[in-house]
Image (cartoon, grey):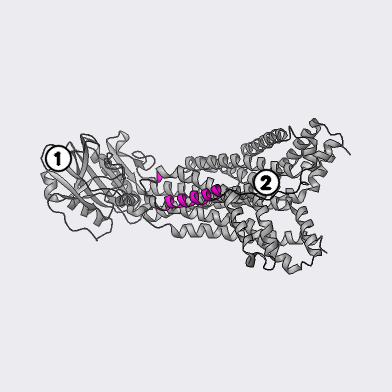
Amino acid sequence: MSFLQFVYRNVARSKRTYAAYFLSSAFSVMIFFICALFLFSPYIRGQLIYPIVMQTMITAECIMYLFSFFFVLYSVGSFLTSRKREIGILLMHGMTKGQLNRMVLMENMLIGLGAILTGMAAGLITGKLFLMIGSRAFGMAPIPFYLPWQALALTAGTFVLLFLLISVCTSVMLRNRTLIELFQSGQRPKTPPRTSGIQSLLAAVLLLASYSLAATTTVNTIYIRMLPVVIMTIAGTYFLYTQLGVWVVRLLQKRRLFFWKKTNIVTVSNLAYRLKDNANMLFMVTIISTVSFCAVGVFASINTLSGQFREDYPAAVSYLSKGGNSLEAQHVQQLEDELRAKGLRPAIVSFPVKNIQVGLPASEGDSALLPVISYSSYKQAVEAAGDSDLEKPLEGIDALVMISSERDRTYTRIREMEVYTLAEERLQIREIGYTSRVPVPEHVLREMKWKREGDFSGLVVSDRLFDRLTSPVSVDRYTGFYVDDFERTLGLGERLAPRGEVRYDAGQPYAMTVSGTLYVTQMTSYRAMLFAALLVGTVFFIAAGSFLYFRLYADLDYDRRQYDTIAKMGLTDRELNRIVTGQLAMLFFVPILLAALHSIFAFMALQSFYYLSIAWEMGAVLACFVTAQVAYFFFIRYNYLRNVRKTLI
């Protein structure tokens, strides 16, 4: 038998243990290859959405590749740990360290090359399907299947390099191991798991504190709390499995009525050892599942913003001419002609915007420019957009802060009202509330940049007070074109706004937004991110299931001996089902439920960014993942019981 045949038989004999690892690696290769198909497709390159697709897919590929490296490294390390006794026997029979390293390298590359070929073959088979789904998600015509050589070379080259690096790392893991240590691996009796009361208490305190901070965060504090909450949650989860979980099991063992009831004595006794042996795996599964839930949930929730796009951009085309712009009339006429050429009959609203100089508190600076429009102008803009429910007319020095997007309404919960003093007119303007509608889209007017709580666009004052503002620094003119079907404005005014937007601070003599172009760009971005998050989240979720699978089957021989011994004492098939189901349920559902709990509080923090509720999206994402885990649990339970019963017949 040649050395290569020896290596092949080593892998073939352990195919059951390596199955989940192999399939997960192949699935990662497949998703990486599919992303490369999008990245190098010539049918996407020439389109407006290509920069968005390219950035999204490159990010997804980097995340998957980095994760695959650590997943493969951990998996191979776990397999080597379970094979220490086998390695010790080989060394005792004359295998040299060089041969051992070569054996590990060849085994890793054999599995790796098989996973690469399988993943790329699966990608070729399912590529057309994913291209169809992707084209639907990106809102474009169906993408013809095309096999670029760059996608093949990138996928094969990066994953061959990955498995080579892993082989080098695993060779290092085997160094400085004595023969007796390797040979006696798995034969030493297990020591009772020990717990620390302080660390158990620390786990509870860290998790409760992180949940409390996440639940009470606001849009103003989320950036400050984010990193501490993440660190506390990770540390609390680790101590939960290594300390608090074992401590709880010890308490259950002291409750004699529960502990001595039916098969609980076997289930609970094994639970403490399983928590100790599988703590790192359970911790990793929990964190990976949490990342999967949050990644998909975040981008699924972002999609809710598309429902308020019309409120954020009431005019199909918004054009603001800065003071002194000599091309205003030409631009306005050009936009109107293009709209009519598309068969659209716009309602046109035009009004002045005065930029006045106001005094500020000492902490904010001496003075700043503040955009101001009249109440009648605000009314014109809102009614042209099809809304009639307006605030009552303003009086005196009262003013409403202009909401520039519905997203900024979250800041109204924490923002304080201001009173402004005009530098020249010796007048005051007092904020009394916020507009119920967006009159002018964000970035079209000069923003109130000295206010940190949101990007508000200025003030609405009474017509009388507006007329009294006789010494503005500059006067701009806003022109809005209102149509029923704003999506038909896609590509309008490409010369003026190539990507649908020119911001006020872009250095041009005008600012402008085209709703149709921005809507397609925004929706494509959200859908591309959601599509990529689903791909990456699925890879993470399958990898988490793989950890459970190969950890479970790595202990199968020990479990067989244990259940065989108990069966000789009268264990029935029904009792075996109950014990196995309880232990598997702990391994499968404790991490997934804890990950779901982590995600719920993460979404509660995320809700502070939204004026609309995202509870439905949260529930849908978590329900889908939990349903998949339930199906996976019953599949593994059936196969595991079948393998255990082989020694009991």
- Seen in the image, is 601 located left or right of residue 83? left
Image spot of residue 60 (x, y percent)? 55, 43
Residue 26 circle label: 2
In the rendered image, the quadrant that contains the N terminus is top right
> What's the amino acid at mark 2?
Ala
Q: Residue at x 25, y 46 (%)?
A: 479
Q: Quadrant of residue 69?
A: top right
Front residue of this view, candidates 395 and 101: 101
In the rendered image, the quadrant that contains the C terminus is bottom right
Image spot of residue 355 (x, y percent)? 20, 40
Give yes or no for residue 207 being in the magenta stretch.
yes
Q: Where does the magenta region start and end?
A: 194-223
> Is residue 100 shown above or below 485?
above
Circle 2 residues within 10 Å: few <14, some 14–19, many ≥20: many
Q: Is residue 433 visible?
A: yes
Q: CA distance from mark 1 to mark 2?
A: 67 Å
Image spot of residue 119 (x, y percent)? 67, 46
Q: Could you tell me which secondary element the residue under label 1 belongs to? A: strand
Q: Residue at x 78, y 53 (%)?
A: 557
Q: Residue at x 77, y 49 (%)?
A: 15
Front residue of this view, candidates 127 and 624: 624
Q: Residue at x 23, y 34 (%)?
A: 365
Residue 21 circle label: none
Q: Which residue is mark 1?
A: 422
